[in-house]
Image (spheres, rainbow, N blue to C red):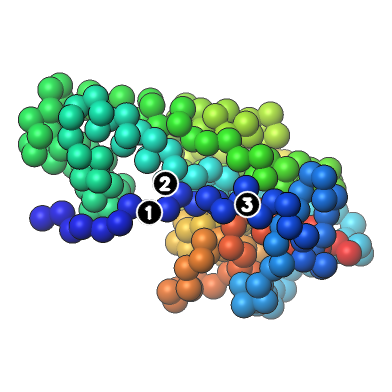
């Protein structure tokens, strides 16, 4: 039975309203291109790490290995846009799709099998699954504040790469829809390497592409298992994006921020 719940609010929904505020004094950037609200000290707790700190005494270029889904992009917003289209096309309740997604996220064929059984959908489960995988990357929203944050890192000499689990074409389509493809040309996708995060091999493949070492690199992502545990195992510093969630226990990051914009501001502030 599907449990009722309220559909998740898309991530970063408050960014636009916050862009005009003054940034935290320790993380202030050019206000015309990149501003953030005052950063919460509760979110900015850094654990000790033996690696070289990022700062003015650092001799090598710093590196950021960035997750994609729910880090650079907003999965909830893309799913909500798809659900609206699909519900209208098949005359079924939009909220039902959100409820089913909560039950079957990560098991998308089961999701469509349930939808087909419940609402007698035409077509096969595989046809709906294929159409979903093709359409949802196109619905990933473009968020200027995220793009500005990535541009700020690049402008300050950071080497950047995307490290993501998923299908090559779908993940690249998400980056294009978000307006990030040109900003992040180095993309390491699990389907191209035969391994998935948290396997350290995927992070090491990204470092090899950049010609970088573990001492220079941070892993930034929202998944404690895939990103934080994986980055820790790879010998990298890790920064968890909490999206307002308390840490549930398990893998510990060296630092926590609320979202990718806040994370980028914090990384740049360490150079001062």
Dot 3 falls on a residue whose secondary structure is helix
Q: Which of marks 3 and 1 is nearer the N terminus?
A: 1
Residue lying at 45% horizontally and 31% vertically, measured from the top left:
139
Instruction: For residue 206, say whether it is visible.
Output: no
The residue that mark 1 highlights is: 8
The picture places residue 34, in percent across and down from the top left corner, at 76, 49
Query: Residue at the location (57% across, 45% down)?
Result: 72
Tell which circle, 2 or 3, labels the residue nearer the N-terminal end: 3
* x, y percent for residue 188: 57, 38
Label 2 sits on residue: 76
**Answer yes or no: do the residues labelled 1 and 2 have beta carbons within 8 Å?**
yes
Residue linked to disc 3: 17
271 or 118: nearer the eye?
Answer: 118
| Viewer-nearest residue: 215 or 103 | 103
* Residue 225: numbered disc: none
Image quarter where the C terminus lies is bottom right
Residue 90 placed where, x, y %?
19, 27
Q: In this view, does 260 lie above or below 224?
A: above
**Residue 3 in the figure: left or right of residue 12:** left
Question: Is residue 59 in view?
Answer: yes
Quadrant of the image for the N terminus? Answer: bottom left
Q: Residue at x 82, y 68 (%)?
A: 26
> Residue 42 lies in what quarter of the image?
bottom right
**Above or below: residue 171 compared with residue 164:** above
Q: What element carries label 1?
A: loop
Give me the C-alpha separation between circle 1 and circle 2. 7 Å
Are there few (<14), some (14-19), or many (20+) residues within 10 Å of tag 2? Answer: some
Cα gap from disc 3 to disc 1, whole angstroms: 19 Å
User: In the drawing, does residue 94 fall left or right of residue 171?
Assistant: left
Q: How crowded is mark 1: few (under 14 residues within 10 Å), some or many (20 or more)?
A: few
Q: Do the residues labelled 3 and 1 touch (CB within 8 Å)?
A: no
Residue 202 location, x and y as percent? 54, 47
């Amino acid at each position: 039975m599907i449990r009722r719940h309220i559909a998740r609010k898309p991530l970063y929904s408050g960014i636009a309203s916050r862009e005009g505020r003054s940034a935290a004094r320790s993380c202030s950037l050019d206000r015309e291109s990149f501003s953030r609200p005052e950063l919460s000290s509760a979110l900015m707790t850094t654990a000790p790490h033996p690696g070289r700190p990022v700062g003015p005494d650092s001799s090598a270029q710093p590196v950021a290995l960035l997750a994609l889904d729910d880090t650079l992009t907003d999965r909830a917003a893309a799913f909500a846009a798809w659900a609206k289209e699909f519900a209208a096309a098949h005359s079924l309740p939009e909220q039902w799709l959100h409820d089913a997604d909560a039950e079957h996220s990560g098991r998308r064929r089961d999701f469509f099998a349930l939808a087909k059984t419940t609402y007698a959908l035409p077509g096969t489960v595989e046809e709906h699954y294929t159409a979903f995988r093709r359409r949802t990357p196109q619905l990933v929203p473009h968020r200027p504040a995220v793009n500005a944050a990535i541009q700020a890192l690049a402008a300050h000499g950071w080497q950047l790469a995307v490290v993501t689990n998923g299908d090559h074409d779908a993940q690249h389509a998400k980056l294009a829809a978000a307006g990030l493809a040109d900003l992040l040309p180095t993309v390491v996708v699990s389907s191209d390497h035969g391994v998935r995060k948290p396997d350290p091999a995927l992070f090491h493949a990204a470092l090899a592409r950049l010609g970088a070492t573990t001492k220079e690199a941070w892993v930034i992502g929202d998944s404690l298992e895939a990103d934080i545990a994986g980055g820790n195992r790879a010998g990298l510093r890790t920064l968890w994006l909490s999206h307002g969630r308390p840490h549930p226990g398990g893998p510990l990051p060296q630092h926590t921020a609320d979202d990718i914009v806040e994370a980028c501001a914090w990384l740049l502030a360490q150079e001062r």
